[in-house]
Amino acid sequence: MYKDQAYLESEILAADGVKLVRMLYRGAIAAVIAAREELRRGRIAERSLQITKAGEILNELACSVDRERGGEIARNLVELYAYLQSLLQRANSTQTEPPLQEAQSLMETLLQAWEACSSSSSHQATLPNPGFHHAPEAPALQMSVAW
Protein backbone atom coordinates (compact mmCIF):
# COMPACT_ATOMS: atom_id res chain seq x y z
CA MET A 1 0.00 0.00 0.00
CA TYR A 2 2.83 2.41 0.78
CA LYS A 3 4.20 2.13 -2.77
CA ASP A 4 0.74 2.89 -4.18
CA GLN A 5 0.47 5.95 -1.92
CA ALA A 6 3.95 7.16 -2.90
CA TYR A 7 3.16 6.63 -6.59
CA LEU A 8 -0.08 8.59 -6.29
CA GLU A 9 1.64 11.42 -4.43
CA SER A 10 4.33 11.69 -7.11
CA GLU A 11 1.66 11.61 -9.84
CA ILE A 12 -0.20 14.46 -8.11
CA LEU A 13 2.93 16.56 -7.73
CA ALA A 14 3.83 16.09 -11.42
CA ALA A 15 0.32 16.67 -12.79
CA ASP A 16 -0.87 19.76 -14.61
CA GLY A 17 -4.14 21.46 -13.63
CA VAL A 18 -6.35 19.55 -16.06
CA LYS A 19 -4.94 16.21 -14.96
CA LEU A 20 -5.48 17.16 -11.31
CA VAL A 21 -9.11 17.98 -12.04
CA ARG A 22 -9.58 14.59 -13.73
CA MET A 23 -7.92 12.87 -10.77
CA LEU A 24 -10.23 14.66 -8.36
CA TYR A 25 -13.29 13.61 -10.35
CA ARG A 26 -12.07 10.01 -10.33
CA GLY A 27 -11.56 10.19 -6.57
CA ALA A 28 -15.03 11.62 -5.98
CA ILE A 29 -16.60 8.98 -8.23
CA ALA A 30 -14.72 6.21 -6.44
CA ALA A 31 -15.93 7.55 -3.09
CA VAL A 32 -19.55 7.59 -4.30
CA ILE A 33 -19.23 4.04 -5.63
CA ALA A 34 -17.82 2.97 -2.25
CA ALA A 35 -20.63 4.83 -0.44
CA ARG A 36 -23.21 2.98 -2.53
CA GLU A 37 -21.61 -0.34 -1.63
CA GLU A 38 -21.46 0.57 2.07
CA LEU A 39 -25.13 1.61 1.92
CA ARG A 40 -26.05 -1.80 0.48
CA ARG A 41 -24.10 -3.48 3.29
CA GLY A 42 -25.79 -1.34 5.95
CA ARG A 43 -22.48 0.09 7.14
CA ILE A 44 -23.58 3.58 8.17
CA ALA A 45 -20.28 5.02 9.41
CA GLU A 46 -18.35 3.78 6.38
CA ARG A 47 -21.03 5.11 4.02
CA SER A 48 -20.96 8.48 5.70
CA LEU A 49 -17.15 8.60 5.53
CA GLN A 50 -17.20 7.96 1.77
CA ILE A 51 -19.90 10.58 1.19
CA THR A 52 -17.85 13.05 3.22
CA LYS A 53 -14.78 12.26 1.12
CA ALA A 54 -16.71 12.88 -2.12
CA GLY A 55 -18.06 16.14 -0.68
CA GLU A 56 -14.58 17.34 0.29
CA ILE A 57 -13.33 16.68 -3.22
CA LEU A 58 -16.27 18.56 -4.74
CA ASN A 59 -15.58 21.43 -2.35
CA GLU A 60 -11.97 21.54 -3.52
CA LEU A 61 -13.12 21.62 -7.13
CA ALA A 62 -15.64 24.39 -6.42
CA CYS A 63 -13.04 26.50 -4.59
CA SER A 64 -10.67 26.19 -7.55
CA VAL A 65 -13.08 27.66 -10.09
CA ASP A 66 -12.11 31.13 -11.31
CA ARG A 67 -15.52 32.78 -11.30
CA GLU A 68 -14.24 35.99 -12.90
CA ARG A 69 -12.43 34.57 -15.92
CA GLY A 70 -14.68 31.53 -16.27
CA GLY A 71 -17.80 33.61 -16.82
CA GLU A 72 -21.12 31.83 -17.20
CA ILE A 73 -19.49 28.40 -17.55
CA ALA A 74 -17.75 28.85 -14.20
CA ARG A 75 -20.97 30.02 -12.52
CA ASN A 76 -22.84 27.02 -13.92
CA LEU A 77 -20.09 24.67 -12.78
CA VAL A 78 -20.17 26.07 -9.25
CA GLU A 79 -23.96 25.67 -9.19
CA LEU A 80 -23.58 22.08 -10.39
CA TYR A 81 -21.07 21.38 -7.62
CA ALA A 82 -23.57 22.80 -5.10
CA TYR A 83 -26.28 20.55 -6.53
CA LEU A 84 -23.95 17.53 -6.28
CA GLN A 85 -23.27 18.45 -2.64
CA SER A 86 -27.03 18.56 -2.01
CA LEU A 87 -27.39 15.10 -3.55
CA LEU A 88 -24.67 13.76 -1.26
CA GLN A 89 -26.29 15.35 1.79
CA ARG A 90 -29.69 13.94 0.83
CA ALA A 91 -28.20 10.47 0.34
CA ASN A 92 -26.51 10.66 3.72
CA SER A 93 -29.54 11.90 5.62
CA THR A 94 -32.12 9.63 3.95
CA GLN A 95 -29.78 6.65 3.61
CA THR A 96 -31.01 6.06 0.06
CA GLU A 97 -29.17 5.19 -3.12
CA PRO A 98 -30.91 7.25 -5.86
CA PRO A 99 -29.17 10.54 -4.94
CA LEU A 100 -25.83 8.71 -5.02
CA GLN A 101 -26.67 7.22 -8.41
CA GLU A 102 -27.50 10.67 -9.79
CA ALA A 103 -24.35 12.23 -8.31
CA GLN A 104 -22.20 9.45 -9.75
CA SER A 105 -23.78 9.83 -13.19
CA LEU A 106 -23.28 13.60 -13.23
CA MET A 107 -19.67 13.33 -12.11
CA GLU A 108 -18.96 10.66 -14.73
CA THR A 109 -20.37 13.01 -17.38
CA LEU A 110 -18.17 15.85 -16.11
CA LEU A 111 -15.13 13.57 -16.11
CA GLN A 112 -15.84 12.53 -19.70
CA ALA A 113 -16.02 16.19 -20.71
CA TRP A 114 -12.67 16.96 -19.08
CA GLU A 115 -11.11 13.90 -20.69
CA ALA A 116 -12.46 14.89 -24.10
CA CYS A 117 -11.17 18.42 -23.59
CA SER A 118 -7.64 17.26 -22.85
CA SER A 119 -7.55 14.47 -25.44
CA SER A 120 -8.76 16.72 -28.26
CA SER A 121 -5.51 18.64 -28.06
CA SER A 122 -2.05 17.23 -28.39
CA HIS A 123 -0.52 20.12 -26.44
CA GLN A 124 -1.62 21.28 -22.99
CA ALA A 125 -0.80 24.88 -23.89
CA THR A 126 -3.57 24.97 -26.49
CA LEU A 127 -6.27 23.79 -24.12
CA PRO A 128 -9.07 26.27 -23.49
CA ASN A 129 -9.08 28.00 -20.12
CA PRO A 130 -10.91 25.51 -17.89
CA GLY A 131 -12.12 28.30 -15.62
CA PHE A 132 -9.77 27.43 -12.80
CA HIS A 133 -7.65 30.16 -11.29
CA HIS A 134 -5.22 27.71 -9.76
CA ALA A 135 -4.64 24.04 -9.52
CA PRO A 136 -6.02 22.58 -6.31
CA GLU A 137 -3.52 23.08 -3.51
CA ALA A 138 -1.31 20.15 -2.60
CA PRO A 139 -2.36 20.05 1.10
CA ALA A 140 -6.01 19.73 0.10
CA LEU A 141 -5.09 16.94 -2.25
CA GLN A 142 -3.39 15.06 0.55
CA MET A 143 -6.75 14.44 2.17
CA SER A 144 -7.79 12.68 -1.02
CA VAL A 145 -4.63 10.67 -1.61
CA ALA A 146 -6.14 7.52 -0.10
CA TRP A 147 -8.63 7.09 -2.97
Image (spheres, grey):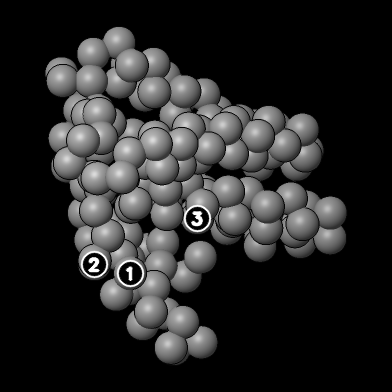
Residue at x-position 53% and y-position 37%: 112
Q: What residue did someone put label 1 on?
A: 11
Task: Identify which amino acid the numbered label 1 is placed on.
Answer: Glu
Disc 2 from disc 1: Cα separation: 6 Å
Residue found at the far bottom of this picture: 2
Residue 93, image quadrant: top right
Q: How many marks?
A: 3
Residue at x-position 51% and y-position 87%: 1
Identify the mark at residue 49; answer none if there is no mark.
none
Nearer-the-camera pick, 109 or 75: 109
Q: What residue did someone put label 2 on?
A: 13
Q: Residues within 10 Å of mark 3 (few under 14, many from 20)?
A: many
Disc 3 from disc 2: Cα separation: 16 Å
Residue 126, image quadrant: top left
Task: Identify which amino acid the numbered label 2 is placed on.
Answer: Leu
Residue found at the far front of this picture: 122
Res 89 seen here: no
The percent position of residue 71, horizontal first and vertical second, equals: 23, 13
In the image, residue 59 sits, relative to residue 26, either above or below, namely: above
- Dot 2 and dot 1 residues touching (CB under 8 Å): yes
Q: Nearer the viewer, mark 3 or mark 1?
A: 1
Disc 3 from disc 1: Cα separation: 14 Å
Residue at x-position 41% and y-position 67%: 145
Task: Identify which amino acid the numbered label 3 is placed on.
Answer: Gly
Q: Nearer the viewer, mark 3 or mark 2?
A: 2
The percent position of residue 65, horizontal first and vertical second, equals: 26, 31
Residue at x-position 36% and y-position 46%: 21
Q: Label 2: state its secondary structure.
A: helix
The percent position of residue 67, horizontal first and vertical second, equals: 21, 21
Identify the mark at residue 27; answer none if there is no mark.
3
Res 118 seen here: yes
Q: Label 3: state its secondary structure.
A: helix
